Image (cartoon, rainbow, N blue to C red):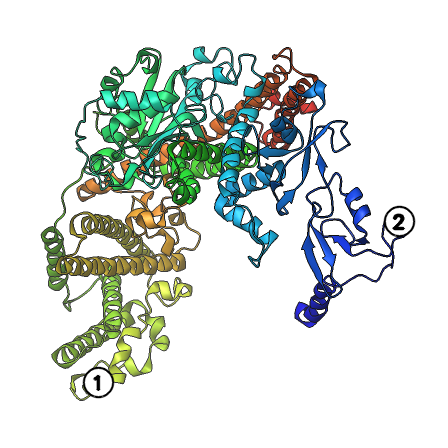
Amino acid sequence: DWLEHRGEFLDELLCHDGVPNTQSTCHSESCSSTDRPFRCRDCFGGHMHCSKCLVDNHRHQPLHRIERWTGSFFERTTLAELGLCVQLGHGGDPCMHPEVMRGRLTVLDVTGIHQVKIAYCHCEKSIEAFLRRTQLLRAGWFPATLDRPMTVITFDALDLFHALTLQSKITFYDFYHTLLRRTDNSGIQVMPDAYKAGMRCVREYRHLLMLKRSGIGHAAEGIDATKPGSCAVECPACPHPDRNLPDDWQDAPANDSWLYTLILSVDANFRLKLKDRGFRDPELGSGWSYFVESDAYLAHLADCPDQEEINECDSRLHAIDHANSRFQKGYVTTGVGCVVCARHTLVRKNGVGDLQKGEKYVNMDYILLSTLVGCVYASILLTYDIACQWSKNFFTRVQKFPVIMQINTVIMAIYFAIPKFHLPAHGSSCHSKFSLNFRRGVGRTDGEGVERDWAHINAVATSTREMGPGSRHSTLDDHWGAWNWRKVTLLGVFLLSKLKEAIENQAKQRAIFADFSATFSTDQIAEWDVMITQWEQDKRKPDPYSETEKATTLADIRLELAKEDTGRAEAGQIALHNVSPSSFIFMGLELEEQQAIRFRSADQKELGTQGANLQDRRNGLKRRIDNWKSIQALYMPGIAERRDPRMNNPDDDDLDNDDVEPEKVEQVESVTLWLPSQVPRMRDVGCISGLHDMEFRFREAQAEVSLRNLRRQLRMYERLLNYKTIQVSGPGQKANTRARALLARFHHKTKICTERYRAARLALSMLKPGGNWQAQFKVLLDDDLKGPKGDEEQGKGRKGYGRGTGEGYKEPSWIWSVQRGEDPEDIALNECLRVEYAKSKARIDRWDEEVRLVAEEMRRTVAFLQYKSKWWFGLTHLRQGLEKDIADGVQAYACKQGHLMDQLAKSFCIRWYPYLSAQKLGVNWMKDYIEDAGDM
């Protein structure tokens, strides 16, 4: 629709380039001048003014953009050219002793780059109090130098760039050149180069914002007394003793103490490099927020010998292998190590450090221990993609650090795990021991939060690698501070969504586990539970979550296929003899199977000898069907009228004629046998007594055997797929082709088992609709065709990994929960079931923990924000002897921040209360914000 009106819109745009015809005199009420050639682009209305009125009206808007009508068009001019001189020190009002600046002051603003004429206040009583830089700062203009600033950037421009760079990762180069183009897009006007001066202002301003927002400006001790990490935004949902934990948290019983575990994720990023540019660039506050203190860090590294990291894990990760080989020429820093809270992905204070040569243990150890200085917890869980190797000798390495950094293992237990996405790349020896799915007290933590931070911070890697060391640190600290604060403000939405997901999946997994465990005897469950408990207490005990593995080779699989093929060939011929009713049904089922085989063969294009052999087999099947039907006349006399008339004569000589037309014989695959299950209404009339029950018993056994074979095929397919992935994958085309051929054969066998089961179940539903058999033999959907290990072993793998697809979301197929016999050949299958039982039990345990843990995180979040609110209000009067204007600002900002924290806590409670109260999870801790919460 808009296209029909674009001409109208274009005309209106052009209209703004002409003189408005609203009036012929100056727009100011007190002026009647007809000389009105000026207008302001930033004032509303676009009215025309004379020069005197325009200057008077813009005494407090000195950065508005002015245009002059030449008689033909508008051209750019400035307020300075019209005579405006901005008076500082008096809020724009006149000064008794002005000091006019020589030349023009370059001002970078959101509207562009301006040349402004200014006058400083030079009143005697304010010479010391109102230094030039102070007068500029009071006006909202940030000076680039201290004594005689020639360039400033407005607070508005600084705030806009700061918001843009944090959101879109724009560089100051792009922002500055955007201002240039807003000022003069033709390049005709000569502009002073204010780029470096502006960069200096940006760096200083972001540092000051960090100090301001962390309360450093309110500290009585002053800025120099700033403690390491005190400028970092901390996670309210994580446990913080003396801030958001109960007073008696250290005395909590075992079934509650796990709620107070600190869970951290460790990782390295090799995109955040730094080029060796050969110049010094000191930090403005080393170690005050997220990076570790540089001097102490580098000194410790210098004292440590260069030790080779040894990889003993059979994983496909290269962090350890490359620990000593990631040095890159021309770079002084090859990446960073980082620690985040695993549950909420906030970067930890003093949790980042530069890497000089790969993921060396000494670097990662130092970074972790730095963020844990002063922390006291009963237990800490650390996730790291190489935790299996990093954890070895960890406590021995810790003893080599300064005492203040050492972990007191007497009061703190340290555990290690591998993030869920990285775990499949490790060898089987790591899978259970370091799995978050099988570790108690972690809920549904995935340990991959640090990877999400990399996706966010990598966008600034290109620009930060060109900076100086100090500027790079302050820039990254700034972005991580914004990341953390954004995470804090979104905790209301995030935690509620996590709780809803946890409660939904808790109920679903409980129902699944109840149905699954009901198929096992009490003794069997007790035996498995003991095995699980023993393994949790001692990882050297037998692992309940993994099967006893056996190396599978192509020769093993070929041998199994050969045995099955030989058995089928030996049993393929059906002998004619006097049959009993039960034998008659059995033969009918055999014929049905032969029809299915011939039907599948009919889809294959066979030429020459193969085609002739196929035709011979069809002819033979036709004879057997006719012979069987001759017996059918005895046991099912009422079926005669339903037969295919063309198939009634068993002596048809055409069957022996090699020239018979193919279309006449090909119908043999589709001939209806009319077994009792196909004529359920003839139970009492048309069939001998008990025939339907005989077929039902055969069909029941057929369904059970088919299901057993299907499970076995799926298991074998899993093992073969694992073999191909681990042992065959690579550049060898021949080995891959042979492995794919075997996979295709097993897939075909799985399809046959599926068809057999579905046919048997359909017959059962016709013979005894609504019977008890339905509890054991359910409808088999395509989605049910997965092995005991799940979709990751059925071809999805890590490529299919994502939200809702992990172990905790897994819904095992019902085929692994049906009643089983005591067939000794099912030993391996029973082991699979034990593994699935253990995993299913772990799933409900983790979801149960997740519900409790998220509810506790909600409580902790509100408690932490209440603490921060009181903390801010307590800063209002710490600094004494301040000038009144500054004291008022200090007090007002502390009250503003305290109110903000309190309102944030209140908004979370309002959002959470309805759902928490509906789920009866306890909301008494909300009583300060929700009136009804104190009664629950």
The residue carrying mark 1 is: 652
Q: Nearer the viewer, residue 137 or 491?
A: 137
User: Residue 68, position in %: x, y?
Assistant: 73, 56
| Front in this rendered view, residue 282 or 123 | 123
Task: Give the image location of residue 361, x and y in percent.
Answer: 25, 27
Residue occupying the far bottom of the picture:
659
Q: Is residue 651 left or right of residue 223?
A: left
Q: Is 83 situated above or below 641?
A: above
What residue is shown with label 2? 31
Q: Amino acid at mark 2?
A: Cys
- The answer to whether marks 1 and 2 mark residues whose Cβ atoms lie closer than 8 Å is no
Quadrant in which the C terminus appears: top right
Is residue 180 something one can see in this rendering?
A: yes
**Disc 1 or disc 2, which is closer to the eye?**
2
Q: Is residue 690 visible?
A: no
- Which of the 4 image quarters holds residue 130? top right
Quadrant placement of the N terminus? bottom right
Q: Secondary structure at mark 2?
A: loop
Q: Residue at x 34, y 12 (%)?
A: 404
Is residue 694 found left or right of 481 in the rendered image? Answer: left
Asked if residue 502 lies left or right of residue 296, the reply is: right
Closer to us: 247 or 475: 475
Instruction: Determine the image quadrant of residue 650.
Output: bottom left
**Relative image position of residue 631 (x, y in whole percent):** 24, 70
- Give residue 195's mark: none
Q: Amino acid at mark 1?
A: Asp
Judge the density around disc 1: few (<14), some (14-19), many (≥20) Cα neighbours within 10 Å: few
Which of pointers 1 and 2 lies earlier in the amino acid sequence? 2
The CA distance from mark 1 to mark 2 is 120 Å
Residue 102 % position (x, y):
63, 37
